[in-house]
């Protein structure tokens, strides 16, 4: 299909601009773009308990969360 060829061409042409790994993720420079503030409504949780994590994947989940905190996706 022509659409698939176009998508593959665009991905190849812009390969260096795509963040393939979370550590490659970045932000726009603040001197070029003002931060966007999105108004939100405070969340009132319906249930105040943590979601249980299976012991078999616990270490992997913790590692993923720590990596996302380290690169700024999640905040403490």
Image: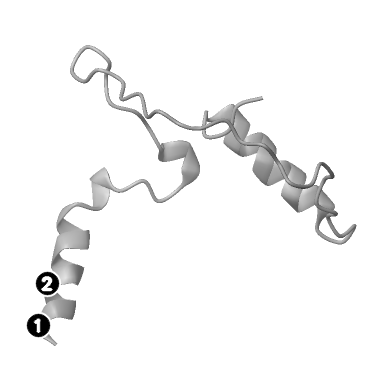
Image x and y of residue 45, in percent: 71, 41
Q: Using the image, determine if residue 49 lies above or below residue 4.
A: above
Q: Residue at x 37, y 32 (%)?
A: 26
Q: Is residue 46 left or right of residue 15?
A: right
Q: Label 1 crowding class (10 Å Cα cut-off): few <14, some 14-19, many 20+? A: few
- In which quadrant is the C terminus drawn? top right
Q: Using the image, determine if residue 62 lies above or below residue 31.
A: below
Q: Are marks 1 and 2 in contact (CB under 8 Å)?
A: yes
| Distance of label 1 from label 2 (alpha carbons) | 6 Å
Q: Label 2 crowding class (10 Å Cα cut-off): few <14, some 14-19, many 20+? A: few
Q: Residue at x 19, y 52 (%)?
A: 14
Tell me the quarter of the picture where residue 69 sits.
top right
Image x and y of residue 22, in percent: 48, 43
* Residue carrying label 2: 6
* Residue carrying label 1: 2
Question: Which residue appears farthest toward the top when viewing the image?
Answer: 31
- Relative depth, front residue between 76 and 26: 76
* Circle 2: element type: helix
- Relative depth, front residue between 64 and 43: 43
Q: Using the image, determine if residue 24 lies above or below residue 39.
A: below
Q: Residue at x 83, y 55 (%)?
A: 53
Image x and y of residue 11, in percent: 22, 61
* Circle 1: element type: helix
- In which quadrant is the N terminus drawn? bottom left
Image x and y of residue 43, in percent: 61, 36
Q: Is residue 22 left or right of residue 12?
A: right
């Amino acid at each position: 299909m022509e659409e698939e060829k176009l998508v593959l061409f665009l991905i190849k042409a812009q390969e260096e601009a795509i963040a393939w790994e979370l550590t490659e993720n970045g932000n726009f420079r603040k001197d070029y773009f003002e931060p966007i503030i999105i108004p939100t409504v405070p969340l009132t949780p319906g249930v105040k308990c943590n979601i249980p994590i299976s012991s078999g994947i616990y270490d992997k989940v913790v590692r993923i969360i720590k990596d996302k905190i380290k690169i700024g996706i999640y905040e403490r």
